[in-house]
Image: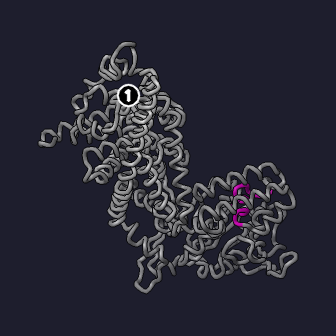
Amino acid sequence: MGEIDVLKGKKEIEIALVGNPNSGKTCLFNDLTGARQHVGNWPGVTVEKKEGRFEKGDKSIKVIDLPGTYSLGAYSEDEVIARNYIINEKPDVVVNVVDSTNLERNLYLTIQLLEMNANIVLALNMIDEAKNKNINININALSDFLNIPVIPTIATRKEGLNELIDKILSISNIKPKDGFIIDYGKEIEEEIKKLTGIILNYPEISKRYPVRWTAIKLLEKDSYIFNEIKKTTNLETLSQVERSRRYLQEILGDDPEILIADMRYGYISGLIKESVRKLQTSEERYTISDKIDKFVTNRYLGIPIFLLIMYGLFQFTFKLGAPLTDLIQKFFDFTGSWLSNILTGIKTPEIIISFFKDGIIGGVGSVLVFIPPIFLMFFALSLLEDSGYMARIAYIMDRLMHSLGLHGKSFIPMLLGFGCNIPGIMATRTLENKNDRLITILINPFMSCTARLPVYVLFAGALFSKNQGLVIFSIYILGIVLAILTAKLLKKFLFRGKTSPFVMELPPYRIPTLKGVFIHMWEKGEAFVKKAGTIILGVVILIWVLSHLPFGVEYASQSSYIGKIGSFVSPVLKPAGFGTWQAAASLIFGVLAKEVVIGTFGVVYGVEETGLAKVIQQNFTPLSAYAFMVMTLIYIPCAAAIGAIKRETNSWGWTGFSVGYSLILGWIMAVLIYQGGRLLGIN
């Protein structure tokens, strides 16, 4: 139906067809318009412009066939024309025609359209050919993941045409959905945030272009957008763009444009894994990442490989860290004795000597000796993260969590919890479903953060020296298991509902740069050092004071305030095998910060050359030591984590539940391990 047939008074809808070359776009255009089309050139260029019309009910639909393109960059006139038309003309609906037999390549354009906030319907063309090639596409899943309508079509036979037109009409008055965001990783996201903050200061830019999309384009050094920005903003904006690009290149070892493209393909790879099943032939070529993923993310091998890698990580950390820890321990022992002799020599009051020797060096020093294993662990985790394997862990666990009826995205905050529970709790903001978010907040403290690591290293080194890595590995695994079981219980009894879908980005494997790994290691580890110099220092001074009061009592005796506090709680801990007042006091003050558990031992035992390890050997058995480590893992989140739970749940009730549940569960687990071990004849 030609333009002359359009009746006055009919509502006109404008749609744009966009897709890769050879996706069947032109055939679909002819199906829709009946091949009645007007052909000209786009203004200022020689690229062909095709327009046509058709009617449906009281609607007149204008169809613009945009040039076939693989992406929406600024590499060719075709790309710029298609992109500018969508941004500037804002068609009511963009019909993205994709070749079903080659989804991975075609969806790259789809992702770019979604980032532009276009109102999209996806025409899954050549669906018959996909079936003939044993490609089974879960259309509902694909639609759910992308959050757009997906219509299977066979343009050559006009199949699916009516459904496509109905869907175009039904969404033509709907505002495009915001919120499609690919997580490009911490470093790139931080630079995007800086640039979006600047762009928002220029309404002439922010009203014309989607702000986040513009920031990404600047990082990609899109020449067209760069020149547009140059006309409007000041030199500082352009300088920030260059600074951001240089920073990313230095820290991640590649051009931001390549890194961003990799993340997009990573997202698509995850999307394909979740929604497409294909019977592969041996002749089909795999990329190196595909070949590795064939084993690493395998349904049956994925979790055993993950466990093996984590076991290797702990062995690396503690085998290499143990001699370094001993060296630092000797340094603090020497410093304590040396300082004590100097102060005694100049007749310094005993209490001042005790403050420096028992309080500062005994308390803070006993925590700082664990710097080597902590930094080594962060080094290993940074290697896994920068190589692309960390994303695979989330993908592997996503499948397991889905099988338990939980949201796979929840495992990402749990992974962050290995570093520190607070960012893990805050990362739950990415979960759209309120119930999923609440569950993930409540289970996050069960993930072993690095603040607990000094406790594990001390006890495992003192009583399990031959199997130190294996013992600590088991504690980490226990935390994951308890978190998943708790989530399952909460989901079953308190938060019933359907789990929403999501796609896990699978970036290609990379060889990490040494500079990037060291920077990431330092970023993660410096918080531990800072905490030792602030919170831990403050708490050990408090414990030292309580160990001296009331005046006249023996230092750090059961008659001191700290002794009385510990003695009041210790009977409750006796069934768990560590019913001493020193252990009770360390757990009480450990609520302020988990590292303080060690700091407290350092102060109340007044450790000298013998070191804490020997004191632990004298006061714990292997069985009670393991029960104590489990208690440290589970009981009550630290004060900062409690604050984060209150802030994120906005509920004292759920905060109280988290504290109470973890305390009771920790005690039960510790008692079960100790009493169960004794029944089995283990000491």
Relative image position of residue 361 (x, y in whole percent): 43, 34
Task: Report the predominant secondary structure element of the magenta stretch.
Answer: helix
The residue tagged 1 is: 588
* Spot occupied by residue 312 in the image (x, y as percentages of width and height): 35, 60
Quarter of the figure with residue 257: bottom right
Mark 1: secondary structure: helix
Q: Residue furthest front?
A: 345
Classify 28 as above or below 617. Answer: below
Q: Position of residue 413 (x, y in %)?
A: 48, 48
- Identity of the residue drawn at 53% across and 43% down: 426
* Residue 498 seen by the camera: no
Magenta-span inclusion, residue 13: no
Amino acid type assigned to the residue bearing label 1 in the image: Ile
Quarter of the picture containing the N terminus is bottom right
The quarter of the displayed image where residue 443 is located? top left
Q: Quadrant of the C terminus?
A: top left
Is residue 117 among the parts visible in the rendering? yes
Q: Position of residue 543 (x, y in %)?
A: 42, 25
Residue neighbourhood size for the residue with mark 1, other residues' Cα within 10 Å, grouped as few (<14), some (14–19), many (≥20): some
Residue found at x 77% / y 72%: 80
Residue at the image point whose x is 56% and y is 78% from the top: 126
Depth order, front residue of 473/271: 473
Which residue range is magenta in the image? Answer: 208-220
Q: Nearer the viewer, residue 29 or 665?
A: 665
